Image (cartoon, grey):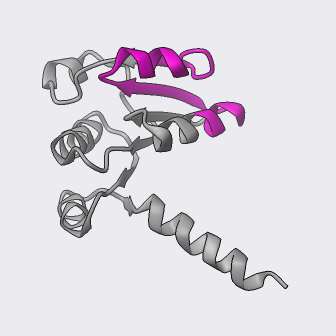
Amino acid sequence: MNKQCVIVGLGKYGISIARKLSDSGVEVLALDNDMKMVEKVSNYVTKAICIDVTSEEAWQRLPIKNFDIGVVCFGENVTASILSCLALQDAGVKYIIAKAGDKMHKQVLEKISVNEVVFPEEFVGELTAKKILEME
């Protein structure tokens, strides 16, 4: 059985994850409230849906019961991030990774038991610095 991943938020971070997972054969459901972003990814993900992630009713209509992984890609919109994480938990998503915009956002995500909180810019910055240090 293939992995199933729901990506919530289709900015640069979310789109890059969706594209890589799709290219690797993962079943990807991409969600965003911006139809242009949904259309942008619809050609390479399994399914792309435009929804208001702050609407409990919208989440209840989604086919995400028991997805393996959820990735919440909002760093700036803390409300959308938190509500998306809670909706994924309620749907039975087994492992949730969420992007945090700052340390307070990270603390809230940890308090609601998100499995993994990431700061993508810091991570890539560290990788870039490491690469530079290894250069001759």
Name which residue lies at 28% across and 19% down: 51
Residue 35 at what x, y percent from top left? 37, 15
Q: Is residue 132 visible?
A: yes
Q: In the rendered structure, does residue 35 fall within the stretch colored magenta?
A: yes
Name which residue lies at 51% across and 67% down: 123
Above/below status of 25 relative to 83: above
Quadrant in which residue 22 is drawn: top right
Which sits in the foreground, 135 or 124? 135
Q: In the rendered structure, does residue 29 fall within the stretch colored magenta?
A: yes
Residue 76 at what x, y percent from top left? 26, 48
Q: Which residues are magenta?
A: 19-48
- Decide if residue 41 is on the left or right side of residue 26: left
Query: From the image, which quarter does the N terminus lie in?
Result: top right
- Decide if residue 100 is on the left or right side of residue 56: right
Which sits in the foreground, 91 or 7? 7
Quadrant in which residue 55 is drawn: top left
* Residue at the right extreme, as displayed: 136
Above/below status of 79 relative to 1: below
Residue 122 at what x, y percent from top left? 46, 68
Which sits in the foreground, 101 or 71? 101
- Decide if residue 14 is on the left or right side of residue 114: right
Above/below status of 9 relative to 47: below
Name which residue lies at 44% across and 33% down: 6
Quadrant in which residue 45 is drawn: top right
Residue 24 at what x, y percent from top left? 71, 37
Above/below status of 68 relative to 45: below
Q: What number of labels is visible?
A: 0
Name which residue lies at 66% across and 79% down: 130
Query: From the image, which quarter does the C terminus lie in?
Result: bottom right
